[in-house]
Amino acid sequence: MTATFHYRENVLFCEDVELSRITAETGTPCYVYSAEALREGYLAYERALEGVPHRVCYAVKANGNLSVLRLLGGLGAGFDIVSGGELFRVLKAGGDPSTVVFAGVGKTREEIEFALENGIFGFNCESEAELALISSLAVRLGKTASVAVRVNPDVDAQTHPYISTGLREHKFGIDIAGVEQVYERARRLPNLSLDGVSCHIGSQLLDASPLLESARKMVALIERLRARGFGIRHLDLGGSIGVPYEPGETQPDLAEYLTAVRLLVEGRNLTLLFEPGRWVAARAGALLTRVLYRKRNGEKEFIVVDAAMNDLIRPALYQAWHEIVPLRKNQFGTIVADVVGPICESGDFLARDREVVNALPGDTLAVLNAGAYGFSQASNYNARPRACEVLVDGASWRIVRRRETLDDLIRGEE
């Protein structure tokens, strides 16, 4: 549980809104986000970095709802994008393109042109071929592109292999052993401003040590590049620390980690960039789902709910753990059960062998810490319309994305 999602007399609230009031009007499944938690997630970075040249670029891939982007942009956030579609979302939400950093290993010609035409802050480049393409497109458009090479520092993030990105065997970045030569060759390309260095070793780090090791390597690299005559002005350290999901997990102190980074760059005339997504959005959201059936196979208990892996794929994809609690506490205690959805896959589960509330058909449950990589990874698998999204702010709430209809499923098809 969090301060944002909390019980009052056995009834679950988000901020000052009783969640059962929302489901009574919207139905389920439904994603609910707390504006207060989103603000606090972003402002925690701003407070810790006060007085240091910096930009906090929210990672749009974590949760790209237009109202979420508008809220964070209004606080001064920049944006980290990994596709042209995410840039389109930022622009539609009123975001400032000059605060946008474009990352990703497979940018297309069309996406790069779109970004150049809209005047984004810069590109985090992942290959020499990409540098050459950006250069040629910038020449044709009469633009100068600010670029930072994404460096693979060969640091083990010690996280799930699907979200670890900092080792030599990963597709991301350029090996630190050869990156100085890459900068030298890129120096000859026209219309590029080689003014940054970037790295991101993975998501969901609950130990700051790999992050600080990576930062130290980047600072040393910057000094070597400056000695070669490169005007490196900014250091992008990526997504930073993760959040605890499971009982017993603890997170590093964000302010302590950022203070350590500040000391590393002190006196070096560098602007720091960070790209948090999970930190800002995860704890701000919950997926609400209704119990459809109770089922027993031998000794195995199942709670069948109306949310599924198409709504929240993290448990199936990453073996992720999410706390599941009732919207109204009952008097029937707990059971050990699998919480599963209607998808025709054995991998369709929200929890396995979990001690959960002894919920009955018609009860509503909240899957917590689902604000990041929840709806953004949702699909229409099994021809299921995607859930609605709701934003709570104090005692008020509103639907910020309507539930899809059956007609939405076939839009664009012939």
Image (cartoon, rainbow, N blue to C red):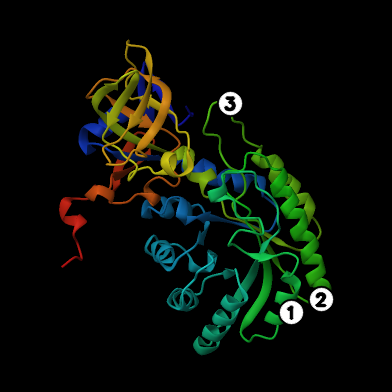
Q: Is residue 290 left or right of residue 61?
A: left
Q: Is residue 126 visible?
A: yes
Gap in Å between the C-alphas at discs 1 and 3?
A: 47 Å
Which one is nearer the viewer's eye here, 361 or 251? 361
Q: Is residue 229 above or below residue 266?
A: below
Numbered disc in front, either 2 or 3: 3
Q: Is residue 33 above or below residue 24?
A: below
Gap in Å between the C-alphas at discs 1 and 2?
A: 9 Å
Kindly state the secondary structure of the residue where label 2 is placed: loop
Amino acid of disc 3? Gly
Which one is nearer the viewer's eye here, 394 or 318? 318
Is the Cβ of the residue at disc 1 closer than 8 Å to that at disc 2? yes
Q: Is residue 284 left or right of residue 259?
A: left
Residue 362 spot, x, y in % from top left: 22, 25
Kindly state the secondary structure of the residue where label 1 is placed: helix
Residue 184 is marked as 1
In this figure, which residue is indicated by the disc labeled 2? 228
Of the residues under marks 1 and 2, which one precedes in the sequence? 1
Residue 11 occupies which quadrant of the picture?
top left
Residue 398 spot, x, y in % from top left: 29, 43
Numbered disc in front, either 1 or 2: 1
Residue 150 spot, x, y in % from top left: 64, 65
Kindly state the secondary structure of the residue where label 3 is placed: loop
Of the residues under marks 1 and 3, which one precedes in the sequence? 1
Residue 248 is marked as 3
Gap in Å between the C-alphas at discs 2 and 3?
A: 47 Å
Is the Cβ of the residue at disc 1 closer than 8 Å to that at disc 3? no
Q: Is residue 75 left or right of residue 393?
A: right
